[in-house]
Amino acid sequence: MRYMALNNNEKKAVLLASASFIASLLFLKFSGFSVSSIVNFYNHIIKSVIFSASTDTISAVGLLLNPFVLVFASLVFLALAISVLASFGTQKSGNISGIIGGIAAVVMFSSIAGIFLAVAVFFCSFAPRFSSMYSREMKKWVKFRTGSNTAGKVLLVFNILIALGIFSSVLAYQADYEASFKNEMRDSVKALALSLPGASGMSSEMLNERVEYTTNSLTNSEFFGAYITWLPVSAAFTAWVILEFLRNLVLTNIAGLFARLMMRGRV
């Protein structure tokens, strides 16, 4: 009971951080993004390039990035949660909001990757500890850099845990993801075939036959076998590279801005 006794700032931190964690998870849930999305990421690029052939550059980029809009919104709310804890949270309020966020992650994503996501969300609860350390070390732009550096440290571990979760999930269900990848590849081959000159004059039976032949030739090759063997590693690495790019270029700066605004009392 004594542990649960929170002052006003701690209550505010728990409320805002927990709400931000849950909002982040809801955006991720509604995006439909999953481990399969990472596994089929390169197929998505191929299909986006093919389908954008008759559009302008802006539309083509929109087609490529459209599935990731809600995922990015999810990461922004995650950065907001970290900023809240970095700005006026304590380790006590961080632990409570981290537990709430972790439970929400397990409920919304009941899978191996979901367990790692829950652990990653809970790790964000250590933001107050990092922010306290950084605020003592820095002299210039303290408010911005406290939020930015705290988010950078927390999100680094968060990204590693997410990559480990993807690796474990793909490894555990490798046959299922292989089948998913083959189906997506078949769709990509069909889209490519339809875009070639003369495809409109082919019967659907002949087109399907050509697609099936090409797909089987690709999937029975040694290269494809090696790719499937390395699929857990490549999927995890792809996710980690994308998340690290966003962490370094976007999310740490967003977190720094949030922290600066909150420490000035605007939020």
Image: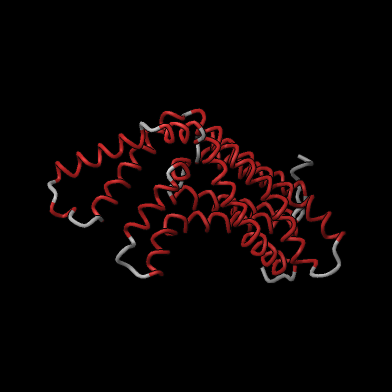
The foreground one among 156 and 146 is: 156
Relative to 246, 180 lies left or right: left
Q: Residue at x 44, y 50 (%)?
A: 30
Q: Position of residue 52 (x, y in %)?
A: 34, 62
Kindly tell me whether residue 54 is visible in this rendering.
yes
Residue 226, position as x, y percentages in the image:
47, 33
Q: Position of residue 110 (x, y in %)?
A: 50, 35
Is 161 drawn above or below residue 88 in the view shown? above
Which residue sits at x=32%, y=58%? 51
Q: Is residue 257 left or right of residue 54?
A: right
Q: Is residue 9 among the parts visible in the rendering?
A: no
- Percent from the top left, x then y, of residue 82? 68, 54
| Residue at figure coordinates x 69%, y 43% from the top left | 123
Residue shown at 68% from the left, 49% from the top: 156
- What scheme was used to colour the molecule? secondary structure
Compared with 80, 179 (above or below) is: above
Residue 19 placement, left or right of 211: right
**For residue 183, which quarter of the picture?**
top left
Quadrant assignment for the N terminus: top right
Count the marks: how many?
0
Image quadrant in which you'd find residue 215: top left
Q: Nearer the viewer, residue 42 or 256?
A: 42
What quarter of the picture does the C terminus occupy?
bottom right
Please state if 86 lies on the left or on the right of 231 as rendered.
right
